[in-house]
Image (cartoon, rainbow, N blue to C red):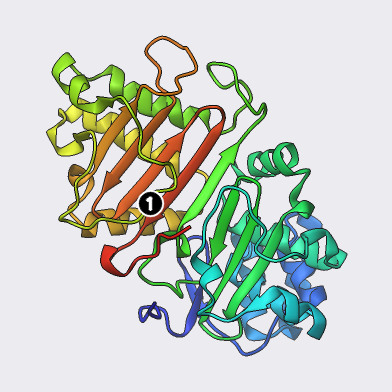
Amino acid sequence: MTHDSNHPNGLRLADDNVFPASTDTLSRREFLTTVGKAAGTVALAVAAVHIMPAAAQEVTRVLANKAKPVQAETMVKTLYASLSPKQRETLCLGWDNPLRSKVQANWFIVPQKIRDLTPDQKEMVRGILHGVTTDEWYPQILKQMDEDGGGLENYTIAMFGDPTTNRFEWVLTGRHVTLRADGHSNANAAFGGPIFYGHAPKDTEDRGHPGNIYWKQGEKANAVLAALDPKQRDIALLEKAPREDLIKLQGTQGMFPGIAIGDLTKDQKKLVEETMHSLLSPYRPSDASEVMRDITANGGLDKVHLSFYKQDALGQPGIWDIWRLEGPSLVWHFRGAPHVHTWVNVAKDPKTADGHI
């Protein structure tokens, strides 16, 4: 794991503007002021700007001028500063702890749940989650947590490393969620490491996945399959899928199932690009950009293969519920039956990437 040398002295906002890091941490009142989106809250933030620490002042100006949310890693630092000594003993782990890069479909990184935090700390967690997701997807992900785990408060968080430095990572876990915010501490890995997402409105879903927030991604992928000619389809459509949690990156010498994107026509490639846009749409632009950076560094989408699997189809003619994108630096495994499980691992250097479960 290496530090991101491109950003040694700053924090990133959602639009990749950089402001100088400060040793000052936003106080509770300052935090609640800066994360508010209502017009009255912004006005209050503007009035208070002259008495705030430098980093907080800059966040407030951004809110007042552009109504942008506070960057997630700024809120991680504020949450860390709010923890009591007892909370730090349970929620804060060393940077080298192997749990930092672990990913599973349903697990709790620590025994303590978000419901055990103070009301202000719970709001900070919500702010961090909103910071790493898009405005469109944030309420949908909260809906998924409500339906799958009884709500965000039944999930867990942990912080690895030291959030007062530039080497730390915040991880959210629970049923159908492993999500990270790392402030570019892990410069090699998109998302800060492997992630997981899923949804189960019903444990065994009906065909077409009614109510599943992620099935539109499946529809986008299947549109690529529908556009293939018979010869291409014979290459892309396979009988048995690899185990869903096999996401270790293979590098340029790997053997990948399915059809290479580089062998598709221009129109077919456009459908693949639309699928990638759908896959990345839940996440903040900086994380989406890192995914495409890492794919590009390893030959681009042309080196990625797309495969579909006949097993466990839910019965909709011509629609396959399990599919996989895999290349030298990417695994994106989508399992749609009996409900959606998705495992993701993307890194710039596959040889040093995480990928264990």
Amino acid type at image mark 1: Ile
On the image, which quarter does residue 297 sit in?
Answer: bottom left
Q: Determine whether 254 is above or below 140 in the image.
A: below
Can residue 121 be spotted in the picture? yes
Residue 354 percent coordinates (x, y)? 40, 64
Q: Residue at x 70, y 39 (%)?
A: 148
Element at label 1: loop
Camera-side residue of 270 and 45: 270
In the displayed structure, 153 sits above or below 58; it is above
> What residue is shown at x 19% (from left), y 20% (from top)?
234
Q: Residue at x 27, y 54 (%)?
A: 295
Q: Residue at x 14, y 18 (%)?
A: 231
Q: Which residue in the structure is indicated by mark 1?
A: 247
Snapshot quadrant of residue 308? top left
Residue 189 position in % (x across, y down): 39, 64
Question: Please, which residue is most extreme toward the bottom here?
Answer: 23
Residue situated in front as seen by the camera: 11 or 93: 93
Residue 201: quadrant of the picture: top right
Counting from the top left corner in percent of width and height, residue 41 is at 79, 61
Left or right: residue 56 versus residue 355 is right
